[in-house]
Amino acid sequence: MQIEHRIDAKLGNLIWLSDGRTEAAAALDFGIRIVHLSCAGKPNLFYSQPEDLSDGLKTEEGWRIYGGHRFWASPESSRSYYPDNAPVACELLADGVCLRQRTDPWTGFEKTLILRFAPDGRLSAEHILTNRNPQTVQAAAWGVCTLRGGGTARIPFPGGVAGEYTPGRVLSLWGQTSLADERLRFGPEEICARHLPLGTSLKLGVYTARGEISAENLGQRLTVSCEVHPIGQCADRGCNVELYLNHDVMELETLGMLAALSPGQSTRHTEHWTLEPLQAD
């Protein structure tokens, strides 16, 4: 396990982590953002926002996407876009790093992300969402991996069982998303989405008993998995996995359990990232 400090001309101070099979980097000058993720020696799977911000992924209040993995609280609102441009606190661990963002004055949440390498080569990303408001707030921890465009995403969505009396699957659509979108393909056991540089965005959410979403691009496969909670405990009308596409990016998202957080109370949501090199054709 190697952990070292690096300075990137564009991103500033980074903590670089590698176990010889997988490489990751966390930003220190803004965030929380994990800005690099790849198999060793392979291209970065995560999106990196252009310096001129020409992708339009910014707000008038100063928030910008940066790219990489970010930590949000669900449900989403205009308050989600607080400008997280300040440095983060960083604690080095024997097997990873702990990042802590100052309390967000727009939402009143404090966010901590613990990224660790497991002996089997996976990474765990533990999201700890703490309510610093003076009142109880209902929220779920929400992990968002923003990937470079050009890949293909897959969400396990197996069929149900005959005779079910309650729904075991959920499909939610945002905005003007259409099931007829040429990027989408619905199979008997999965939903597949190709990233194409189109001018329209697409977002859908599902409840999948597998608690998993994956993407293939640049000769690598990233699988993001999480603990599965009952539909009734999930945000966004029962979703635990969500997918977003626009002209530039593809986002793989998972959500933790929706909880009523008293002042000072925390909720935790852990993603497991599995990276595999793909065989060349």
Image (cartoon, helix red, strand yellow):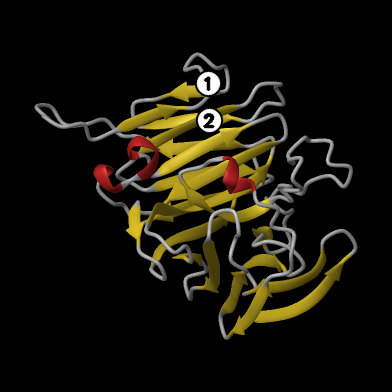
Residue located beneath label 2 in the image: 203
Q: Is residue 21 above or below residue 65?
A: below
Badge 2 amino acid: Lys
- The span from disc 2 to disc 1 (Cα, nearest Å) is 6 Å
- Please give the name of the residue rendered at 67% of the width and 80% of the height, measured from the top-left corner: 2
> Cβ–Cβ below 8 Å for labels 2 and 1?
yes
Residue 189 % position (x, y): 34, 32
- Residue closest to the far bottom: 94
- Please give the name of the residue rendered at 68% of the width and 38% of the height, measured from the top-left corner: 249
Residue located beneath label 1 in the image: 177
Image quadrant where residue 102 sits: bottom right
- Please give the name of the residue rendered at 46% of the width and 60% of the height, measured from the top-left corner: 272
For the image shown, how many numbered marks are present on the structure?
Answer: 2
* Mark 2 neighbour density, 10 Å: few (under 14) some (14–19) many (20 or more): some
- Residue closest to the far front: 134
Residue 164 % position (x, y): 12, 30
Horizontally, residue 272 falls left or right of residue 21, namely: left
**Mark 1 element type:** loop
Quadrant for the N terminus, please: bottom right
Horizontally, residue 89 falls left or right of residue 141, namely: right
Upstream in sequence: badge 2 or badge 1: 1
* Mark 1 neighbour density, 10 Å: few (under 14) some (14–19) many (20 or more): some
Q: Is residue 142 above or below residue 76?
A: below
Residue 236 % position (x, y): 40, 38
Seen from the viewer's position, the closer of residues 167 and 263 is 263
Quadrant for the C terminus, please: top right
**Mark 2 element type:** strand
Image quadrant where residue 56 sits: top right
- Please give the name of the residue rendered at 30% of the width and 34% of the height, measured from the top-left corner: 158
Badge 1 amino acid: Thr
Using the rendered image of the protein, determine whether residue 171 is visible from the camera's viewpoint.
yes
